[in-house]
Image: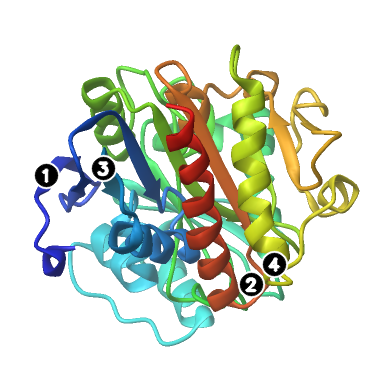
Amino acid sequence: MESTGLPLREWGKALDGTPLIAARAGGDRLPAIFVTAGAHCTETAGVHASLELLRRLKTEHQVHVLPLRDPVGFGGVDRCLSLAAGEEIKITDPQMSLDVLRDRANLLWSEGNLYLFQWGEIGFVWGPPTQGLETFWAQFALTGRLPQEAPEALRSLLGRSIFFLNVNATIEGAGALQRCYHTVLGHDGQWLHLNRFFGQSEAPPEVAAVDALIQEVKPGLTIDLHEGNGQGFWMPIPRPETGQERVLSMTQAFFSYIQEQGYPVETYEHWQESNGIEAADPNWMVPEPDLEGMFWLQQERRQEGPNLMTYAARVGIGYGTEAPMEQPLAMRVDGLTHGILRAIQVWEQTC
């Protein structure tokens, strides 16, 4: 971002002290636009697309772009293990990471080929690298299971970060060693990722930094770029109390670009088949009948607290994307970048 010559501002620091930086672009017109990504550092396309939007978005509105919310996890296995060890660790393959953890960390829990370790103040979940999202879903399921089935195994990790290793071994832009999925075990025992904890006094520093930006800037449009399961693009969007047609028009514009390029659009039925989230209410997301690929997000039904989109919806429109992680990286970046540019154009016309 320094190469852009744009004003930069630090909004907080990550777990290891790395500054969380946003660039200021656009003009001075309000309300502002806030673009961000990288809460799940395995979702690389959103980070690239944020930087592309910083370069391409031409608007009179004030723009803030914070492209990476988890620099530690984005640094990969070496960085996460080195942080725990207090010294440089070099890993050359997934098995080596397991060997190092077995040798130097404390094993808290295991089942089959899944392991939970604690090394210093940091937790690590290890699972074998697999195709697609298989390892991720196996590890992610533990966030709901272990607080219920083995809370004693988690006690020493309360309030601490827990990284998943080998999450997306075959995903272009991620890989077995390039990224670690960052979660936090809350002081209340709820095990969540970095797109939660908003509005909480004991929020992880990565979340607190974004919260500070939301509270000060009060963006009229917050765009959170994500990637997920499914073979096509889809949009999980909080249903606004007013202006629902405006959001629908923005999303129609987004998908117009996706369809023009011949990129796939996810159906609700296929999304359900590939979804591994076990929520308290299975109807936490429902399809928009007039637009394939658009789903109304009812985050409160998951009983996990707000994500960024639902939190930001208190001051403006909370808007987000899900690119298909198992598709080529170039497609994902292009679809996110140019689809969002079209959605912003519609938003500007209705300000």
**Type of the residue with mark 4:** Glu
Mark found first going from the N terminus, 1 or 3 = 1
Mark found first going from the N terminus, 1 or 4 = 1
Identify residue for label 4: 260
Contact, CB < 8 Å: mark 2 with mark 4?
no
Q: Is residue 123 left or right of residue 288?
A: left
Identify residue for label 1: 9
Name which residue lies at 9% across and 50% down: 7
Q: Is residue 311 left or right of residue 232?
A: left
Q: Nearer the viewer, mark 2 or mark 4?
A: 4
Disc ID at residue 126: none
Mark found first going from the N terminus, 1 or 2 = 1
Mark found first going from the N terminus, 2 or 4 = 2
Name which residue lies at 63% across and 65% down: 325
Residues under labels 3 and 4: Cα distance?
28 Å
For the residue pair 274 and 58, the one nearer the viewer reads as 58
Residues under labels 1 and 2: Cα distance?
39 Å
x then y, percent, for residue 189: 51, 25
**Type of the residue with mark 1:** Arg
Indicate the secondary structure of the residue bearing disc 3: strand
Q: Nearer the viewer, mark 3 or mark 4?
A: 4
Relative height, residue 191 to residue 324 (above, below): above
Disc ID at residue 64: 3
Residues under labels 1 and 4: Cα distance?
37 Å
Residues under labels 2 and 4: Cα distance?
38 Å
Identify residue for label 2: 128
Indicate the secondary structure of the residue bearing disc 2: loop
**Type of the residue with mark 2:** Pro
Mark found first going from the N terminus, 2 or 3 = 3
